[in-house]
Amino acid sequence: MDITRFQAEDFDPKAWINETLSSDVMEIGGSTNNDKSNTSPLLGISSSTTNGSVTTSDMSYQVNNMIVKLQALFTELSIFMEEEVKNAIQKIPNALFEIERMKEETVSLFLSVTHLYKRIETIEENCYQDNKYFETLKELVNLKTILSSILLTLEQSKTLTKSLQQLDLLFRDISKPTLSPNTNNNNTINNNINNNNTLNNTLIDVNEISIETLKEMTNQICNVEECVNTLEPYSEKVKNKSKPKLLNYKEKLIEQLIGNKFVNEMTNNKNNESKELIELVYKIDSMKGILKLFELYYEKTYQQLIEQQTKSQQFYNQMIYILKQEDLIYKKLFQGLSKEIQQDDLRIQVKMKLIEYCFKHLKFTFLQQDDLQQLIMIQYKSTKQFAKQLGVDLSHQLKIQKLIFDPFVNLQSSYLRKLEKEYTLKQVKPHLSMSDNIVECIDDALTHLFNECENALERCITFTYGIESQPFIKTINQVFEEFGTSVNKIVNNEMVKFLKKKNNNLQVVFGDGERQNIQNGLKLYEIVNDKERGIKQMLDELENKIKNRLLEILKDIITNQLDEYYVKIQTDQVIKQLNHFYNSLQEVQLPLLSVAIKSIDMNILSPIHEFAKNALTLYVKNVLSSIAPKPNQPTFYYSLVGDKQVEYIDDAHLPELHHSIQPSRFITQIGEYLVKLPEQLEILKNDDHVTYWLDTVCKETISLMTNNLVAPTSGQKFQIQQWNADIRYIRHLLVDVLDFQGQLDSLNTI
């Protein structure tokens, strides 16, 4: 039995069985009726047929025979494999011995080869040192190398001379001016053109120059350049004369001949001719030459259009339009160029050249606005939008980013130190004097202060990406400090006005002016001390906003997720400092606006509190001042000579007196004011503020009376009685009417 098919990797037992049985059936079915038996040549299985058909029993018989054969074959294979394994096991010790022997022989061979190599080195060294023939041979080899180099140099020099002569002839022929139709053959032409002159003053029509001529000139320039590069290290003449001449010819060919022709072909939409010119220039000066061609094309096509733009947004819009139009042209123009010229790279390079050209021919400056808000939030944002519209291929080029954003760099690094404070205060301070009502002015100014600080935060993020975050925090503190000083001055000036106001009447009165001062003081107090929108609460919110925004933007900078030009140009030291500041913001609860908090306490909250307190107690002060004794006279109670000198108020809200003496007029005036004080405090919306000011006014009243009144402890009886009547009246109002819970030890009867 042939078992070679069993060894195949793709052997399929089912397919082999079906194939074998099918072949047997075909052999049986094809035999004649006289053949009583047919033996399969493959398996040696006999099968009987009846009228050319195979019975089921015959097929079963054949299958059984096949199984028997296979089992016998499997048994033989098993026996053979066992014998082979036994033989292999018996040979293993011999194999190990052979391996060890080969290892020893390998080590011995290595030592022999090493020794031989050292002997060869010694022989070689001795040959070169002691045998002059080897030295001579060595010198001859070196001489041959030098002679070959000289021969190559001479050939290059000959080629250079010949190519330069041909270039001279070509440029001379092209530089000859053509005769006008009115000249005859006898006229002479004064042609002062020599090989080193430019072609600017010659009468050249580039359309008459054939592409074959330009190709010939290109080939000659390439030959000359190859020779110059070879000969320049050995010849000063080549370096000082031939190379400058070559560069001059290259410039003439690219800028004046091919360049002018390229501009004409591009203007006339001749793409095939333009492609040929691009290929020629690439051979002469690679990508640099191609960019020079397009610069000439841009100069003729777009220079006047760009110079007409007078505003940044107009310039950006025009640029985007030009780039879109040019991109459509480039897709057709660059198709089919040689493989050496990468089309995608060329398209990016020429568009970058177009952007450079447009910026180079601007007729206005970007940084001309005086308004910082307009400059940063409008002009700079429009610049960023323009960069975004350029697309990823262009906007991510560092060269383009430098071109677009370089005008802003100096301002970005210095505006927080020089402009932000002045600008923010300029937006806020005018609101402090926009009205005669001090409450409206301060309330409006505070609202604008916090709004402008948030705008300043956005300017910092937009303009410096948080890189200038530490100067920004310092600036915000300075803004609050200077704003607080201004508010302090305004509040103190207003307070001085009503404190120094003299009452022309003989009697102290509580009029509309005094009432307005109280309302202003209380309104200001409630504005800055509101539980939800007070100045400290708003400052806390501002500090949290600043901290969160800075953490967010600084994280992007530290993890290199910001592809912005201003971020890229920062030094490693700056990034390290930002990283340290970022970690400090995260780990430590830094009071970013500590100076602002101090300024608010000292310049806003404290003066406003004094304003409200003085407004509320001014009437009491004035009443007590009205009974102050003149110089060299005893105090009020000691000055009384009889009860007839005491003034009373008949309709006063008096308590039930246990004696016939009424309180003095000035005490009654104070009492009437205290009784009506809750009405004055109704303007306050916060009940805690009402309670606070009731208690404060009562304490201040007690303090003023203690400092201005002296109990007549050693006085006459009616003086003591009057003192007691006044004290009882005041104590009754404070305790029973106003529910004052404070100390009254300084107001005791005698």
Image (tube, grey):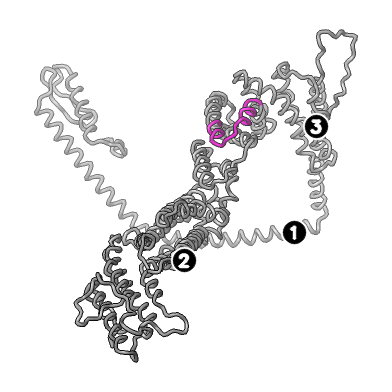
**Considering depth in this image, is 441 or 146 the residue closer to the camera?**
441
Mark closer to the chain start, 1 or 3:
1
The picture places residue 5, in percent across and down from the top left corner, at 30, 35
Residue 220 percent coordinates (x, y):
75, 27
Camera-near label (1 vs 2) is: 2
Where is mark 1, residue-wise? 125
Is 605 left, or right, of 341 in this rendering?
A: left
Say what amino acid the circle numbered 2 marks.
Answer: Val
**What secondary structure characterizes most of the magenta part?**
helix
- Which of the labelled discs sits on residue 496, or is there none? 2
User: What span is in magenta?
Assistant: 300-318
Q: Secondary structure at mark 1?
A: helix
Residue 301: image quadrant is top right
Residue 579, position as x, y percentages in the image? 48, 60
Kindly identify which numbered label has been placed on residue 241. Answer: none
For residue 301: magenta? yes
Q: Please, is residue 9 above or below residue 451 in the view?
A: above
The span from disc 1 to disc 2 (Cα, nearest Å) is 110 Å
| Residue type indicated by callout 3 | Leu
Q: Is residue 159 inside the magenta stretch?
A: no
Vertical position of residue 358 compared to residue 492: above or below: above
Query: Which residue corresponds to the image point at 77% horizontal and 39% vertical from the top-left?
Result: 230
Say whether disc 3 or disc 2 marks the residue closer to the N-terminus: 3
| Dot 3 and dot 2 residues touching (CB under 8 Å) | no
- Residue nearer the viewer, 721 or 483: 721
Tag 2 secondary structure? helix
Which residue does the numbered mark 3 point to in the structure image? Answer: 160
Residue drawn 51% across the image and 37% down it: 386
The residue positioned 70% from the left and 31% from the top of the image is: 284
Q: Amino acid at mark 1?
A: Glu
